[in-house]
Image: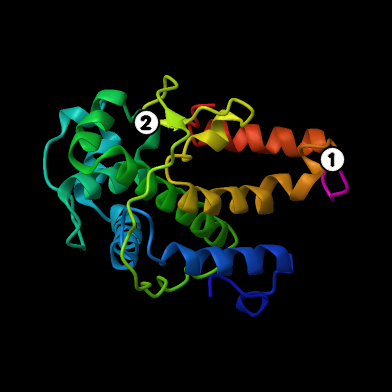
Amino acid sequence: MAVTNHDSELDIDPMFISTHNDLWLRLGSCGTWWTGPQRVAAMSEVRAAFECDLCSERSEALSPLMIEGVHDSVSELPPEAVDLVHRLTTDPGRLTQPWANTIIDVLGEERYVEIVTVVCVQYVIESFARNLGLPLPDLPEAGDGIPNHVRPTDVGDVGAWVSQTVDKKLANVSRAASLVPDTEVLWRDLVQCHYSRGPQFAELVWDRALARPQVELLASTVSALNECFY
């Protein structure tokens, strides 16, 4: 379980509890390009990144490329996957396309996208817990299964770092992980829970404790603090 109302005296909306718990379990399931155990291993690297000496040194350097070394890894994932997880977790504002290309050349863009999406969903759920003073959940049980390596047929070069759907009706932030739709849906479900809350956002209908301008201001401020590209 990611969180329950019994974990603290906070009155947490049941929607967050049910959605986070559901997503948490799905993060550990077999993906399209990574197995369940590999995805859980990536999640363990997210937590290890916060205690990684190399990540700490790089975060204090003028450029992360100035510091060479080996990450304090806790899994048997390929070193390129470990570097991807650690840097995405601790220094996302300074990732570059040339660096990403070196990772993609080894892992493949599909594996790159899937692991990035897993890390992002995990990061939001764990940040939610940390900021509310809640304990982090145990890592999910790794699911069985063999990745089917099915690549969507409606993707192509749209000028991004990786191939994305050519359907321009979707917002770019929704297209970002469209190369691996079975994992990208986890991100969409998370966005629906935290921000859109069903059709209200798209239809400009708003029935929430915070006014629409307040939500936009809060979201943009957090994005700026997190050095979000958008």
Q: CA distance from mark 1 to mark 2?
A: 36 Å
| Tag 1–tag 2 contact (CB < 8 Å) | no
Label drawn at residue 229: none
Q: Nearer the viewer, residue 112 or 50?
A: 112
Say whether residue 136 is left or right of residue 5: left
Answer whether residue 22 is magenta in the image. no
**Residue 187 visible in the current orientation:** yes
The percent coordinates of residue 26 (x first, y second) are 48, 65
Q: Which residue type carries mark 2?
A: Val
| Left or right, residue 229 beside residue 12 | left
Residue at the left extreme? 69
Q: 181 or 209: nearer the eye?
A: 181
Kindly report the secondary structure that dominates the magenta region of the rendered protein: loop
Nearer to me, 230 or 59: 230
Identified by mark 1, the residue type is Ala
- Is residue 12 something that shows in the picture? no
Mark 1 or mark 2, whichever is nearer to me = 2
Residue assigned mark 1 = 211
Q: Which sits earlier in the primary sequence, circle 1 or circle 2?
A: 2
- State left or right for residue 197 relative to residue 207: left
Q: Is residue 122 above or below residue 69?
A: below
Rendered residue at 42%/72% (across/down):
140
Q: Which residue is under mark 2? A: 162
Q: How is the image coloured?
A: rainbow
Would residue 138 be found to the left or right of residue 197 on screen?
left
Specify the segment rendered in magenta. 205-210
Residue 171 location, quadrant: top right
Q: Position of residue 40 (x, y in %)?
A: 34, 65
